[in-house]
Image (tube, rainbow, N blue to C red):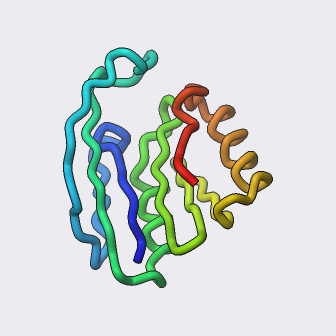
Amino acid sequence: MITGYVLGESLRPGAVFAPHGLRIRKIERVDNSVSSTAGQPDAWTFVEWETDDDGAAGRIAEALADALEPAVGWYADFTVGEERVVVFAGKVFRYRRGDEAGRAEAVAYGRSAGTPEHQLDWDE
């Protein structure tokens, strides 16, 4: 099973993220005014999703990479078994959970893309 989320606000205007077989688990609106940074809205819409198709990870990652807004380092992440997938606009990182070097590479890219340090906190 693959589970993940995407922030509605992180999608480019006009972008569509609709890979076949995804199910919505939950949609939640969160006040983020305390930790949002320049270029980010004060409220975020978390869209949690899942699929039983473990073979869809590459397709989902590419769909996210195509749909994410490149401004302010937006990213989305998800898990496939023991693998973590972190996706930025145009860039995908896949590494085994607990792989410090793999995580460090994704974090370094996030910093270079403008992701605020306190938002480089995805779960392992």
Does residue 96 appear left or right of residue 12 in this picture?
Answer: right
Q: Classify residue 4 by image quadrant.
A: bottom left
How far across and down, in percent of the image, does residue 20 sit? Answer: 29, 77
Q: How many marks?
A: 0
Please determine whether, in this image, residue 74 is positioned above or below residue 19: above
**Quarter of the view holding residue 46:** top left
Residue 3, picture quadrant: bottom left
Q: Residue at x 32, y 69 (%)?
A: 50
Quadrant for the N terminus, please: bottom left
Q: Quadrant of the C terminus?
A: bottom right
Residue at (29, 55) in percent of width and height:
48
Q: Is residue 6 shown left or right of residue 93?
A: left
Return the x and y of residue 21 as percentages of the image width and height. 28, 78
Residue at (48% x, 32% y) in the render = 71
Q: Answer with left or right where residue 96 lies relative to residue 69.
A: right
- The residue that appears at 67% across and 48% down in the rendered structure is 106
* Residue 27 place in picture, x, y as percent: 20, 49
Q: Position of residue 70 (x, y in %)?
A: 49, 39
